[in-house]
Amino acid sequence: MEEKIKKQTKKVCIIDDEPIFIEMYAKKFKDAGYKVISATNIRQGFEVIKDELPDIVFLDIVMPGGENGMDLLAKCKRFPATQDIPVVLLTNLDSSELREQGCRIGALYFLTKASFLPSEVVDLTEEILAVRDFEKKNKKNIINDRPYPGEQKIFE
């Protein structure tokens, strides 16, 4: 029970234009004790990320309105307050070019929706956030042995 209360402070952001996917993943995350925030378009997604500063973002690539998930990923990585938030691309698309592009821009993972159960996505989230907590506690980025960037001011 204590573990569930502790996770409640962790925020997961799901950005997808399909409400059914948001509902499906949100249920699994809520059942695991996470707070879930969401958006169905890129503009709203950036505002939610900027205002809520979630612990992790799951982002679809194909979105309505002219901009796509890669555009939002790039914007988040350029904005000081959001650049260190881990972003996982969670999409129906699967191509080596998109995977490479996402990694180059700054995605932590590229997951194909059909290949992962929502419960597996929750498990991956727990692993990602455990590493992030370790890095914050030890002020060290364990992946590339750099000092951990620390907390950013929201607007610099």
Image: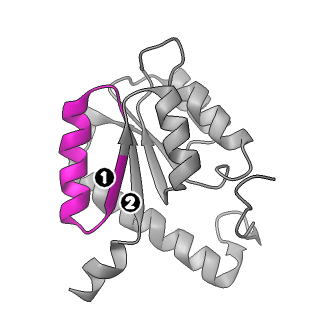
Name the residue beneath numbered marker 2: 125
Furthest toward the right, the residue is: 156
Residue at 36% x, 59% y is 124
Taking 100 as reference, is 130 above or below it?
below
| Tag shown at residue 130 | none
Furthest toward the bottom, the residue is: 2
| Magenta segment includes 21 | yes
Residue at 68% x, 42% y is 77
Residue at 23% x, 60% y is 30
Mark 2, residues whose alpha carbon is within 10 Å: few (<14), some, or many (≥20)? many
Can the viewer see residue 149? yes
Residue 105 is situated, as x and y percent measured from the top left of the image, at: 66, 35
Q: Which amino acid type corresponds to the residue marked 1 in the rendered image?
A: Val
Left or right of 133 on screen, residue 95: left
| Magenta segment includes 97 | no
Left or right of 102 on screen, residue 9: left
Instruction: State the residue in front, 38 or 73.
Output: 38
The CA span between labels 1 and 2 is 6 Å
Quarter location, residue 152:
bottom right
| Magenta region, residue range | 16-37
Left or right of 49 on screen, residue 106: right
Residue 11 is situated, as x and y percent measured from the top left of the image, at: 41, 60
| Tag shown at residue 121 | 1
In what element is the residue under mark 1?
helix
In what element is the residue under mark 2?
helix
Mark 1, residues whose alpha carbon is within 10 Å: few (<14), some, or many (≥20)? some
Residue 106 is situated, as x and y percent measured from the top left of the image, at: 63, 42
